[in-house]
Amino acid sequence: MKYKRILLKLSGEALMGEQQYGIDSNRLMQYAQEIKEVSALGVQVAVVIGGGNIFRGVQAEQVGLDRVQGDYMGMLATVINSMALQSALEKLGVFTRLLSGLSIQQVCEPYIRRRAVRHLEKGRVVIFGAGTGNPYFTTDSAASLRAIEVEADVVLKGTRVDGIYSADPEKDPNAIFYSNISFKEVFEKGLNVMDMTAFTLCKENDLPIIVFDMNKGGNLKRLVQGEQIGTLVSMDEVL
């Protein structure tokens, strides 16, 4: 395998499938099956999943709620999604552990770095819920932070598009696709890969990011086997 330990970042919105909100069971099981196949190859898998299909912290201010309160509500939404993914994986016979940035002992273990690493070493799929456990930080930031802490080889950001483009490919048919791009070029071109905090964390720690289409069956497995899928963001300048 090209990567020994990966951090898979999934968006909460992706779990909606064709629905307007909530969790689509077919999409959930598809993701669980993809993760199972990669784990069976011996790759150590950690997962961070968003909560946008249930609630986003930035929505709080729009409806008159306190932003900090809204962010904590969003963290709880990620725990719900994490529990759903954990249940789907265990239904497929995959051993998992759910670690939370918030203390919810009835359903999650508290996040402890050494414990997380030990779970990964034992071949368990580790799901990180509740983001960083702090308001004003996105799940992208949580993904970058946890990946650095557990010494993952790469952050795999699963999206509904097949990589990074110069513009939104759904709106601009002339958008240019990048197969490889440097952190510096992403800054210079103003491309939206992750929020700035998450992106800077990866850059400063030389942690590559791959943006790929998670909804296409087999992409995750092909990635860890070394195929060039999606867009690689790294320190290397592309000539």
Image (cartoon, helix red, strand yellow):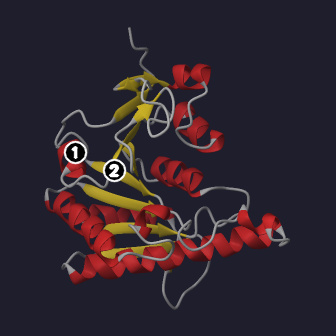
Instruction: From this view, report whether residue 76 is shown above or below residue 118.
Output: below
Left or right: 124 in relation to 175: left
Left or right: 64 in relation to 175: right
- Kindly tell me whether residue 49 is visible in this rendering: no
Q: Label 1, on which residue? A: 224
Residue 6's disc number = 2
Residue at the spot 49% in from the left edge and 81% down from the top edge: 108
- For the C terminus, which image quadrant? top left
| Farthest residue, direction bottom | 106
| Residue 92 drawn at (x, y percent) | 19, 78
| Farthest residue, direction left | 41
Residue at the spot 71% in from the left edge and 67% down from the top edge: 71
Quarter of the rendering containing residue 44: bottom left
**Residue sitting nearer the eye, 195 or 171:** 171
Residue type at mark 2 is Ile
Residue type at mark 1 is Val
Q: Residues within 10 Å of mark 1 (few under 14, many from 20)?
A: many
| Residue 183 drawn at (x, y percent) | 51, 26
What kind of element bears circle 1? helix
Left or right: 223 in relation to 151: left
What kind of element bears circle 2? strand
- Do callouts 1 and 2 mark residues in contact (Cβ within 8 Å)? yes
Residue at the spot 38% in from the left edge and 37% down from the top edge: 163
Instruction: From this view, report whether residue 150 is shown above or below residue 61.
Output: above
- For the N terminus, which image quadrant? top left
| Residue 19 drawn at (x, y percent) | 44, 72
Label 1 – label 2 distance at C-alpha: 9 Å
**Residue sitting nearer the eye, 21 or 239:** 21
Q: Residues within 10 Å of mark 2 (few under 14, many from 20)?
A: many
Instruction: Pick whichever of labels 1 and 2 is earlier in the sequence.
Output: 2
